[in-house]
Image (spheres, rainbow, N blue to C red):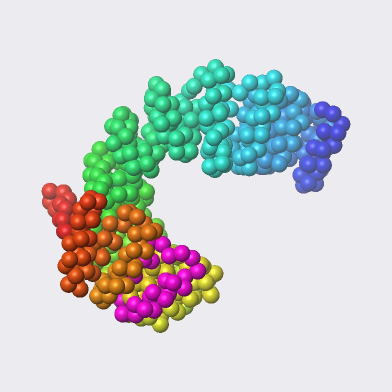
Amino acid sequence: MRHGELSSLRSLARPLTNHLPPRELNRRRPTEYSPASALQNYINSDNPSPGQKIHAHILKTGFTPDLNISIKLLILYLKSSNLLYARQVFDQLPRRTLSAYNYMISGYTKHGPVEKSLELVRHLYLSNEKPDGFTFSMILKGSTAAGPGHHRIGTEVHTQIIKSGVLGDEVLYTALVYSYVKSERIEYARKVFDLMVEQNVICSTAMITGYMNKARVRDAEDVFDKTFEKDVVVYNAMIEGYSKSVQTAKNAVETYIDMQRVGFKPTISTFASIIGACSLLSAFEVGQQVQGQIMKTDFFTNVKIGSALVDMYSKCAHTDYARRVFDRMSSRNIFSWTSMIDGYGKNGSPDEALQLFDEMVNKYKITPNYVTFLGALSACAHAGLVAKGYEIFGSMERFYGMKPRMEHYACMVDLLGRAGSLDRALEFVVGMPEEPNSDVWAALLSSCRLHGDVELARIAAAELFKVSGESRPGAYVALSNALADAGRWENVSQLREVMKARGISKGTGFTWIGTDDGLLAFHAG
């Protein structure tokens, strides 16, 4: 070890030597064996940090550690999450081996900054060492953790793996699949996945999640069916994926039942997803059964589960059940309050919604989020409280520094429209600081239909068609209904011909209920 390097490490370790007992400092010079053995003991322990004193003692005695001891020091500092000292040991190694690079790259990947791991890889390529499968897997983990800007590295690493002739093992293939899924390149992920001799549950879960995020349900089911050794995590991925859409939410319930039939117990993630599925299906009875299961576990006190139950019961139009869960929660977060406020507002109890909103901000001093404000404004609209609505809308930016979004402007238009103030609603829209979007014009159009203002409805519909094209078929239906209510049957016929020519029709709504035979759908429309 050169003198300059030794001085650097001595200055690094000085704070440690000050705390060593005198008898330890005055011991004989360490041998090649004793530091290595002592360091290994600390590395194997649950509390490796005190082992750093050995490094201080080594430097104090002037002993020059060999490569073996230096590597152990590197591992010790990494296990202690001390990247600064680990990097200094790494930089002053007598020789930087591949294992040393791998340890240091792994340390940066786990504890950050991840960019440093990628920098070390470039140094590795410039050295005489060649990366192995572990190196590549660490790079992939690092690039995935670093965020979207580094996802391109996955393809580069894949290319380097092929060029270097490194044999792919389960760890490396898993890292590749996960990297491609995270970067939303699901086809590349599938190619690697299909190359694997044994497709583990980690890869299967990643593939299922990737497909579900792309709404490719059949492909996700294909991966699930081909996963022989399924575990609860794989089932959770399927249930969560199914729970994202009302079209597949029933499958979530069926998979939830199957999972328990084969012996897996639901986790907190399982319950959160299945409650979401019940919300989409308005499956009140099924939701009650799920809550019954939750109450037999420790998860019932979890704020995430409590909030999900409040939201589910509210969406099933059972605010009494939602309030019971809400009142029994030992702790609440903004999502709990928002779900209850929104539930009251959407189920014909605007006074209770606004009372709860005031309690939240005034008594408990909880800052509302954007969704909370939507619930409060919606409650004002249903209660016809124009002044209160303006007060809440104005408080967003004045007291909380939150710039209203288009949804909040649409709520205000709905509030004014329901109150019969169509001229004020139009003035509000015209006076917006940004161009109104389709939600705003749709709110005005709906209000025009409510009060039979056909001329303003034509204006709102025309503006709505401009900004949304044919992506809002409900606009045609609303205008048609407004014309029909006003007795403009000739105009109704003309508009319906246009709708027919463009393939636009009224949608069909449906809800689900639990029965002894499973779930049944009731259609309306």
Q: Is residue 91 left or right of residue 161?
A: right
Q: Quadrant of the C terminus?
A: bottom left
Task: Mark yes or no: residue 2 visible.
Answer: yes
- Looking at the image, which residue is at 49% across and 22% down? 168
In the rendered view, tell whether residue 266 sits above or below residue 449: above
In the rendered view, tell whether residue 128 sits above or below residue 381: above
In the rendered view, tell whether residue 225 sits above or below residue 235: above
In the image, the segment drawn in magenta is 418-445
Q: Quadrant of the N terminus?
A: top right
Q: Nearer the viewer, residue 402 or 2?
A: 402
- Looking at the image, which residue is at 56% across and 38% down? 150
Magenta stretch, main secondary structure, is: helix
- Looking at the image, which residue is at 54% across and 17% down? 165
Task: Mark yes or no: residue 291 visible.
Answer: no
Residue 290 lies in the magenta-colored region: no
In this rendering, the count of numbered labels is 0
- Find residue 66 and report its horizontal and vertical position in percent: 75, 25
Answer with the quarter of the image where residue 406 lies: bottom left
- Find residue 120 and report its horizontal and vertical position in percent: 67, 32
